[in-house]
Image (tube, rainbow, N blue to C red):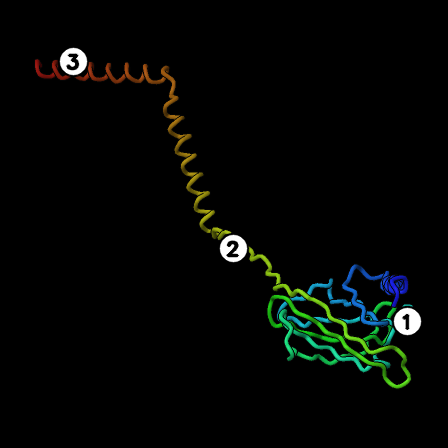
Amino acid sequence: MSKITGIGWLAAALLVAAPIYAHEVEISGEVGATLHIEPDDRAKAGEPTQVWFALTEKGGKVIPLSECDCKLKVYTGKQTDKPLVEPPLKAIAVEQYQGIPGAEVTFPNVGAYKLELSGSPKSGAKFSPFNLSYDVVVAGKVETAKESPKPEQKPAETENKSGNKAEKLSEVSRQTESDSNTPLWWIVPTGILLTAGVVVGAIWLLRSDRG
C-alpha cells in the first residue's frame, strides 16, 4: 500500500469517527477500528465496563459483527500467550453505528492492560483478516468524602436551665445595684431618729432611779 493510499484510508476512518471524541485508532491492513470505553473512556478496576469497536474497512464502510468472525482477548500489561479473559462479543448499536462488536469487561486490578480484537470475514464478506491491539490503563474506584460528624445538640431542658440561671443572676444583680443606690436623704434622718430614741431612753432610766 502506497503512502498516499494509506493517508487516504486513515483520513476516511477518522471522518467516520468524527462525531466521537478522541479515541485510540488502530489499523490492520484494510481494516481499522476505534476503541470506545463507557462511560467517559475511563475503565475502573472491579467494575463491569462496556467496550465497543467502531469497526470499518477501507473507505469508511462499517463492518457489522454479523459479517465478522471476531474475537476479543484481554491481556495484562505484559502480554503473554494466554489471555486473562476472552469476553463474548455482542452486536450493539451506538450512535451512527449499527451491529458493531461490543463486550462487557471487568478489569480485576488497577494497571495496564491490552485488548486484542481479531477477525476474519464470514461467508459473503470481502474484507481482509485483521488483528488490532489497544493499550488500556485502568484506574481505581473514586472514594466519596466522608461527612464530618455533626456537633451534639444540647437538650432543650439544659438550655432552659441555663436560661433560668441567667435570669436569676440578672435579677440579683439588679437588686444589689438598687440597694447600693439608696439615697442619702433617707439614711440620715433615720440615723438621727435612732440616736434621739437612745438618748431619751437613757434620761428616762436616770429619772426612774432617782425617784
- Which is closer to the viewer, label 2 or label 1? 1
Q: Residue at x 44, y 44 (%)?
A: 162
Judged from the image, the secondary structure of the residue bearing numbered disc 3 is helix
Alpha carbons under labels 2 and 1: distance apart = 59 Å
Q: Which quadrant of the figure has residue 3?
A: bottom right
The answer to whether 196 appears left or right of 6 in the picture is left
Between residues 176 and 91, which one lies in front from this camera angle?
Answer: 91
Residue 130 lies, in percent from the top left, at: 80, 76
The residue indicated by pointer 2 is: 149
Disc number for residue 61: 1
The residue indicated by pointer 3 is: 203
Query: Is any atom of residue 70 visible in this view?
Result: yes
Judged from the image, the secondary structure of the residue bearing numbered disc 1 is loop
The residue type indicated by label 3 comes to: Ile
Asked whether the residues under the numbered discs 2 and 1 touch, taking CB atoms below 8 Å apart as contact, a structural biologist would say no
Q: Residues within 10 Å of mark 3 (few under 14, many from 20)?
A: few
Q: Residue at x 77, y 75 (%)?
A: 131
Query: Is any atom of residue 66 visible in this view?
Result: no
Judged from the image, the secondary structure of the residue bearing numbered disc 2 is loop
The answer to whether 164 appears left or right of 19 in the picture is left
Query: Residue 37, relative to residue 177: is it above or below?
Result: below
Q: Earlier in the sequence, mark 2 or mark 1?
A: 1
Between residues 144 and 92, which one lies in front from this camera angle?
Answer: 92
Count of numbered circles on the image: 3
Q: Earlier in the sequence, mark 3 or mark 2?
A: 2
Asked whether the residues under the numbered discs 3 and 2 touch, taking CB atoms below 8 Å apart as contact, a structural biologist would say no
Quarter of the figure with the N terminus: bottom right
Q: Earlier in the sequence, mark 3 or mark 1?
A: 1
